[in-house]
Image (cartoon, rainbow, N blue to C red):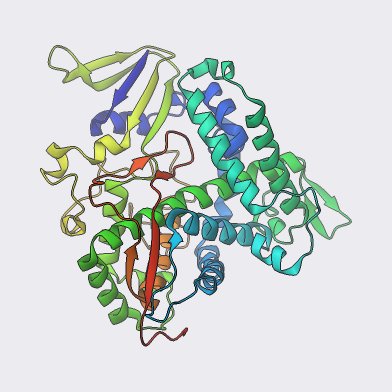
Amino acid sequence: RMFYTRDPENIKTILSAPSDHYVLGSSRGANFAPVAGDGLFTADGQAWQHYRACTRPFFTHTKQQSFLETLENSMQQRWRSLSTESDGWTKSVELQSFFLDMTLDAWMDTLFGHSQADLSMEGTNKGPDTPSRDAFAASLDAAGAFVGDRTVFGKFYWIKHSRNFHSHCETIRAFIDHHIDSSCTYKDFFGTINDDGGLRSDEGTKIQYHQDELRNRVQPLLFTGRNPGGALLAIMFFYMARNPPIYSKLRKETLATFGLAGDVTLANLDTCQYLQFFILESLRLSNVVPAIMRSAEKDLVLPIGGGSDKLSPICVPKGSTIIVCIQGLHLRKDIWGEDATVFVPERWHSRPHDWSFIPFSKGRRRCIGRTSSVPDLFPFAAADTATTEQLAMNQAAYVVTRFLQRFESIQIDNDTRGESTVKHATDISTKFIFNKRMKFLVASDDTNR
């Protein structure tokens, strides 16, 4: 049986339950693994705990600040590619691809010590059979779409198969393996974990893991860093372009806090309240993860959905699939008001962070490196250890702030005002279905001119 829910109490019950109640399920893991990696986002039980522990070192405050510096380098490369016309406007770029490429390069640099752009400029460390970044990204998108299509078959996902899919998976694997082999920094991120997962010493000079283990650790971070991160930035800039007064208000706050060239750090991002509201509203109206799926490991009960009024408890038999409709939850008018489909950052002045807002899921599986000192869903907390949602929001806040410092205005070239909503791709890529080209107006007193 299959259950769909967007009720906060049901969602709280599902995501707060013990680990042996609601799981991802073996078929979901096997289906998603070729794209998202056979690790953090596909494993259950002890395997999940293992990869969670392996990933936690990345979420320290020091690593987060270091990542922002890497993100700055990637952004500067993108800015240099923007040619400026005589009127101060840049030539237009395809919005979503622009940010997906930027986040991919930043994560490659973070995980491997080099980005694809670095290798392209140097012309080294890349054999003739090594997939390019563009080939990797194309395969990631194509394979993600295929996996999404066969998700509807549940445990019979394997019925749908394709030679092209296997070719895309080989491209993904070859790309990651090549960069692991040429990496100088992966051991710094993953070499401090004490376990027996293929660990061995190479003449006492460095720690070496089995290739499959390294790929399983790296692939989820590379996938989630590129796709949800880039898609979130794209949708945020879409909303800023659609709402010039909001862009002006954000820029006014940014210049008052940082000036045109002030350093942006995790600590001073905390002071930008309207930016926090803007990011939260972007996630509410167009969440990058529209739904999540769980499988019941035993006969269970949800508090809402049964009886003639659908308000009584309901039995969930063992083996049932439960779809948590995050996007549907975020658009409920009885929770968010009659303006639930309208972009209003100001609503967050008095909005509590409860189970009616779960942009990054919630509960046990959400929390990588979580400590009690980190406030729940506080965007830019500069605690010793961050959470996954703070990583995404830190990245989004930093990029938006730096663009606000440099560009006086933004504009969508091929905007169609009749498009009231942005659709999600029907796959696991977390991308949006929109083909928008954007251009930027360089500020007259921009220090990068």
Can residue 383 be seen here? The reply is: yes
Residue in view at x 20 percent, y 50 percent: 352
Is residue 229 placed above or below 219 in the rendered structure? Answer: below
Q: Residue at x 64, y 53 (%)?
A: 133
Residue 198: x %, y % from top left: 77, 41
**Relative side of 311 to 76, left or right:** left
- At a point 33% along the width and 19% down the height, the residue shown is 3
Q: Nearer the viewer, residue 271 or 252?
A: 252
Residue 6 percent across, percent down from the top left: 26, 31
Residue 126 lies, in percent from the top left, at 78, 57
Residue 332, by quadrant, is top left
**Residue extending farthest left:** 338
Query: In terms of depth relative to the viewer, which is nearer, 320 or 279?
Result: 279
Seen in the picture, residue 235 relative to 270 is either above or below; the reply is above
Is 45 situated above or below 205?
A: above
Q: How many marks?
A: 0
